[in-house]
Amino acid sequence: MKQDILFDKFSKADNTIASFKRFLLNPDPTVLIYALRLAYAFISNERSSQCFLKHSSTFMTLLHSPQESISTLASACLTRLIITMDDNQIMSILTNDMAQYLFKSLSSEEKNQNFVTAALRLAGSLSSNNRGADFLESSQCISRISNHLESKTKIHKTLASMIFASQSSQTPSSQVLLDKISTFSDFLDDPDLCTYSIVFLGNIAVDPNAAILCIPSLSKMISLIGTGRVSNSKIFTAIHRIVLTPEVYDKIPDSIIEPFLSKTSDLWETQYSTAVFQVYDIFSFIQSGKDILIQQNLKAKISEFSQKLPLTHSQRPLLKRILSRLSH
């Protein structure tokens, strides 16, 4: 199955692809399981993945099989297939059957952990698509997923965190997501979950109400800068979106300003410099923040730095504005 020529030939064999359905409908569980495994292999290869779009409805039917191996394999096939779907194709599977499958499989009463894992992976694939994310919200499946953020099963907790990180880019104003801000703030302390937490908080902060609720997380975010546990790019995106929200200006705690200055003092000549200076700009706009910047001798440091920049440099107006505020 690793030979590319096999996938190429299969993708061009229309009759073979069409006849594959009879194996997926075979009443013999052994035949069906082998057919699903073979289908998953072809779906997982970009050369042949789209050939199985016509079998999406069959995979949907097999989700409800009482046999674990059949249901989880069908779910795995759909999870990979969703990546290749356009909006019309994905809408064809966003049905009551899908909602019922996810709702049942993600139930706290579901004792079979493999069912839960498969359902979470499928939900994760849906959450990466705008229509899929809306479906998880409208069907209330996202509420079921949220329960797994507290799971004692590590893979379920991780998958649920990944889903929320993805979902937050699509439905940042969801009340279910807003209610989990403090949970994701706690996840910043977990090396395995802090990346998903940063992404979630950065995404959801585009909602001004969420940005306000994210303020208590700022100190933890700042402490992560330069540690390597999370990319600086993701950290600055989250901090930037929170701090630059006008509704947050008068709520920024003084306690985060000096730690931010300390963590970013050696980043002025890096790719993060603009984000850093934009945060300084907000600090200089707040009286208490302005006082701290003056105490930290930032006026002299910024003045010296700006003099080294070309006259046409895009950062000069921003730095001049900060200097102007610190001069009055």
Image (cartoon, rainbow, N blue to C red):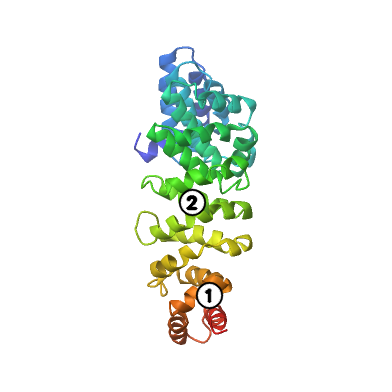
Residue at the image point whose x is 60% and y is 31% from the top:
93
Q: Amino acid at mark 2?
A: Val
The image shows residue 47 at horizontal and vertical percentages of 45, 41
Which mark, by number, is residue 95? none
The image shows residue 50 at horizontal and vertical percentages of 52, 37
Secondary structure of the residue carrying tag 1 is: helix
Q: What's the CA distance linking mark 2 and mark 1?
A: 29 Å
Tag 1 residue? 290
Q: Is residue 13 visible?
A: no
Residue 262 vs 52, above or below: the answer is below
Q: Is residue 94 visible?
A: yes
Tell me if 134 is positioned left or right of 263 in this view: right
The image shows residue 60 at horizontal and vertical percentages of 56, 25
- Select label 2 or label 1 by which is in front: 1
The N terminus - image quarter: top left
Q: Amino acid at mark 1?
A: Lys
